[in-house]
Amino acid sequence: MDIEMDILKVSTDWARAEVFSSKIVLLLSLLFFLAAFGFWQLGKTDMAKAFGWPMLVSGILLVAVSAGLYFANKPRIIQFETTYNTDAKAFVKTETERTAKSQHDLALVFKVLPLIIIAAALLIIFINTPLWRAIGITTIALMTILMFIDSNTNARNTAYHQRLLTENQWTKR
């Protein structure tokens, strides 16, 4: 397979990996839902009972993240081939610009999520009520999971972006 056709495979592999990531996020949301249900049904202390709502809300947020990943990337698997076959140079240029924007956005995410974790930790330290502590602890867990997901997304995006840059240099010859 020559280098020119290889970029289509790299692109579709990247999109498939993003779709797989969405399924992992959905699985994690189910764990949050199970935890919320468990705390709601089995919680005996005020602290245990306080985790129900924050865990439920976090599960819903993870479902939204999963849906966003899935519905943004699943159509790309088919669109990539059509777009690439129509104009390979434009495809590479568009994807290079999109991945560069994603890298910028992810850099911002890696600044914001730790700040949210710090704010949640301060909440745990300074507010001594079960609900607010549960919110703080659940927020830290959620932000940690999002950082895990986004670190994998960032690694895939960076490798894909580098491959696109290589392809872009090759097609300019």
Image (cartoon, rainbow, N blue to C red):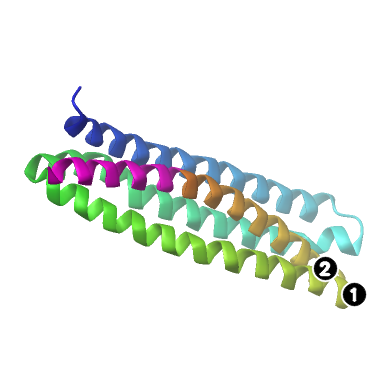
Question: On the picture, is 52 further left or further right than 22?
Answer: right
Which disc is residue 128 wearing?
Answer: 1
Q: Which residue is mark 2?
A: 133
Instruction: Report which quarter residue 2 is drawn in.
Output: top left
Real-space CA distance between mark 1 and mark 2, rounded to the nearest whole angstrom = 7 Å
Q: At which x and y percent is residue 12?
A: 29, 37
Task: Identify the secondary structure beneath mark 1.
Answer: loop
Say which residue appears at 56% left-offset and 60% top-offset.
61
Q: Nearer the viewer, residue 134 or 104?
A: 104
The image's mark for residue 172 is none
Q: Nearer the viewer, residue 43 or 117?
A: 117
State the quadrant of the C terminus. top left
Q: Earlier in the sequence, mark 1 or mark 2?
A: 1
Magenta range:
156-173
Residue 70 drawn at (x, y percent)? 39, 47
The answer to whether residue 170 is magenta is yes
Q: Amino acid at mark 2?
A: Arg
User: How many numbered badges does the structure rendering display?
Assistant: 2
Horizontal and vertical percent position of residue 59: 61, 55
Rendered-image quadrant of the N terminus: top left
* Secondary structure beneath label 2: helix
Point 79% across, 68% down: residue: 121
Q: Are marks 1 and 2 in contact (CB under 8 Å)?
A: yes
